[in-house]
Every structure is written in C-alpha cells, then in structure tokens.
Amino acid sequence: MSRKIAFFDSKPYDQKSFNTVNLNFGFDISYFDAKLTPQTVDLASGFAGVCVFVNDDINAKVIEHLVKHGVEVIGLRCAGYNNVDFKAAFEKIHVTRVPAYSPYAVAEHAVAMMMTLNRKIHKAYMRTREGNFSINGLLGFDMFGKTAGIVGTGKIARCLIAILKGFGMNILAYDPHPDESYAKTTGLRYVELAELYGASDIISLHCPLTPETSYLINRTAIEQMRSGVMIINTGRGKLIDTVALIEGLKSGRIGSAGLDVYEEESDYFFEDKSSDMIADDVLARLLTFPNVIVTSHQAFLTAEALRNIAETTLGNFKEYFAGGYLANEICYRCNRTCIKKDGRRCF
Ligand code: NAI
C-alpha cells in the first residue's frame, strides 16, 4: 500500500519536526503551503493519506473529493476536531487525531496571558524600550486569594488548575461530566455556569467547540460576570461571541481578555499579514484595546508539543497502513475517540 502523505497548511516548524520524527517512520511526505479546501483538494490526488491542522476545512465536499482521489485516511495533527464533517466521513474515510501532545504547553500559555494582562508586561516592555520608566497605569492584582473559573476540566484545564493552585487561587469549575474525586483531591468546587460567571475574577475556557458550547460566552453570560473580569480563551474562537466581548470590553464589564483563538481566525492566524490591511473590522477593533492580547493560536507551540504531535500523527498513519486497530480514530456516532468498555468500537 502507498505510504504517500499530503501534508496541508505546512509551516517551516512543522516540516522540521515531522522530517526529524519521520526518520523513524519512512513515510513519503509532500508538504503543501495551502490549506485543504474544496479549491485545493485535488493536490491530494495520488496520496493515501492527508495530514491537516486546525484551520483546514474538512467539509462534505472535501471529503467527497478525497475519497474520489483514493485518499483513505485523514490524520489531524491537533486535538480539536470541530473542522471535520464526521457525518460525511462516516464509513468512507478514517479520521485520526492527536488526543494529547502537551497539555502543559496550552495551560502554560494561558498563564502567560493571565500574567501579562494582570501585570501589564506588554505595556511595560514597550515603555522601557522607549526610555519611559514610568509605572503609572501598570497597576495589577495579587493572584493569591482570587477566584479562577475554569470551563471544562479535561487534560489542559487540570494542568492549568495545578499552576493556579500554586498561586494560592480558589478554583471553581464547570463541566457537564464533573469528576468529583478529582474535585476532592484538588480542592476545587464544581458549580453551574451562572455561579462560575458571578464569582470568578478570571475565567478560562478549556472545553471543546460543539453545538452546545458555540457562543458559550455571549451577551447573557457576560451580563452575569463580575465587573472587571479577565477572560482567557485558548480553546476555540467560536466559544466566544466576539461582538459581545467587544461590547463588554467597551462597557468595562470585561476588564481584560487574552485570546489565543478567534472565531474568524482562519484568514489571518499563522500567516504574516503585516503588509496588508486588516479587512476584518471585528479583529481590527479587538487589536485596538490596550487590555486585550491576541496571540495567533500559538498556545501549543513548544518543542515538546511539536515532537509529540509528529510522533502521534505518524504513529496513527503507521497503525492505519498496518491494518490494525486505530487507537486515535474519532467516531462519528460518539463524536469522540471511541473506545467502549468491552474494547470494541461502535463502527
Ligand atoms: P479534553 O477532552 O481533555 O477536555 C475537555 C473537557 O471539556 C472535558 O472534561 C469535557 O467533559 C469538557 N466539556 C465538554 N463539553 C463541555 C461543555 N459544554 N461545557 C464545559 N465543559 C465541557 O480536552 P483538552 O485536551 O483539555 O483540550 C480542550 C480544548 O482545547 C480542545 O477541545 C481544543 O479545542 C483546545 N486546544 C487548543 C489548543 C491551542 O493551541 N490553543 C491546543 C490544544 C487544544
């Protein structure tokens, strides 16, 4: 069987880590700068697998063409999979992902944004470089004793909670599948969203993007929050209604926001657009706030995470080509990695 893989939306750091790890796998990888879309899907002709990232659009049309071109497996080199139409993929093409590559990387980036916003490091950095040694306007707050509201208590959230506990913060959490024994050992309290919104000084989002979580942070949610709350989003852009966020920032209800993801990020993030005009007025407005930090979906970007991503992604392809059990396949019926208690899958 062909071991040819078409690698979409490739960046120099991807090629470096995948080429290094591929020395142990020996796949024939062709790197394409283009994202996988209906317009670029023909590039996949002649390949057995495609490797894609968060902003490749794996919709029904793309899947139909991939199947027509003989592609058998889609290897997501990320954890989230909201960009795949699983209904269209079901029983036609296999889809694997990297369930965890470094939850520490994302959690630590969330903390970096919290501390930057709180202690205004972004402003201080610019000031001292210009010879301005004034500290007026750089007032922060002690993290100690403050309350963090964590939405979703999976792998990334648990790393974050461990760090925030180190600061001496109180932790409130919301998860539709609460883990009470984890809560007990950690000393956090699971609460409903309304209580979390009303009691948190910092709110950090760590749930997947699903129909239930789309625009979780909307006008109604923001109205329930404490005045001056900090919001951190390293999850997915569409967890937040950005227009409502901007209103909240303008009114002062939201004190600051650290955003590693943005609902319309696919036209901008990961690309150098510094010579272009920003046509997206919502993004442009966000970038004007002194109390907003936007990073370009970089929370995952550590050396350890890149190595783990390459190892797991190529391991997934290896499992597929060996014809064996696909540990990291995502199931349409379960909408998650499907491993039943009896070891069988539901397809
Ligand atoms: P995970 O699967 O370990 O945890 C997700 C948690 O969210 C689970 O505990 C689940 O029960 C909970 N959840 C599900 N529906 C929910 C809802 N309606 N409300 C609240 N919680 C809900 O996932 P992990 O690895 O912690 O990643 C979380 C998300 O972070 C991913 O889905 C992905 O979108 C994002 N991510 C972002 C990265 C970045 O570079 N910015 C990198 C990796 C992941």
Image (cartoon, rainbow, N blue to C red):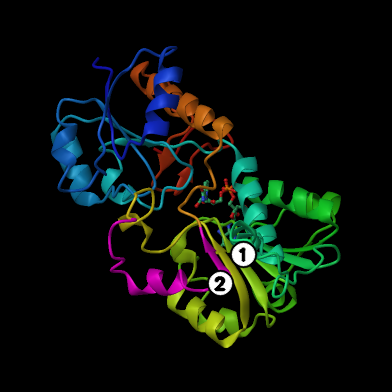
Residue kind at label 2, given as amino acid type: Pro
The reply to whether the C-beta atoms of the residues labelled 1 and 2 are less than 8 Å apart is yes
- For disc 1, the neighbor class at 10 Å (few under 14, some 14 to 19, many from 20) is some
Residue 319 lies in the magenta stretch: no
Residue furthest out toward the front: 131
Question: Residue drawn at (42%, 75%), measured in percent from left and top?
Answer: 285
Give residue 119's position: percent from left, percent from top: 71, 63
Give residue 287's position: percent from left, percent from top: 46, 68
Q: Which residues are magenta?
A: 274-294
Give residue 244's position: percent from left, percent from top: 48, 80
Secondary element under disc 1, as helix, strand or loop, is helix
User: Image quadrant for the C terminus?
Assistant: top left
Question: Residue drawn at (58%, 30%), measured in percent from left and top?
Answer: 304
Which residue corresponds to mark 2?
290
Residue 285 lies in the magenta stretch: yes
Residue furthest out toward the bottom: 251
Give residue 346's position: percent from left, percent from top: 44, 39
Q: Nearer the viewer, residue 309 or 318?
A: 309
Q: Is residue 334 left or right of residue 103?
A: left
Q: Nearer the viewer, residue 235 or 94?
A: 235
Question: What is the number of the mark on residue 123?
Answer: 1
Nearer to us of marks 1 and 2 is: 1
Secondary element under disc 2, as helix, strand or loop, is loop
Question: Residue drawn at (53%, 43%), measured in percent from left and top?
Answer: 300
Q: Residue 154: in sight, yes or no?
A: no
Quadrant assignment, res 187: bottom right
Q: Residue 101: in sight, yes or no?
A: yes
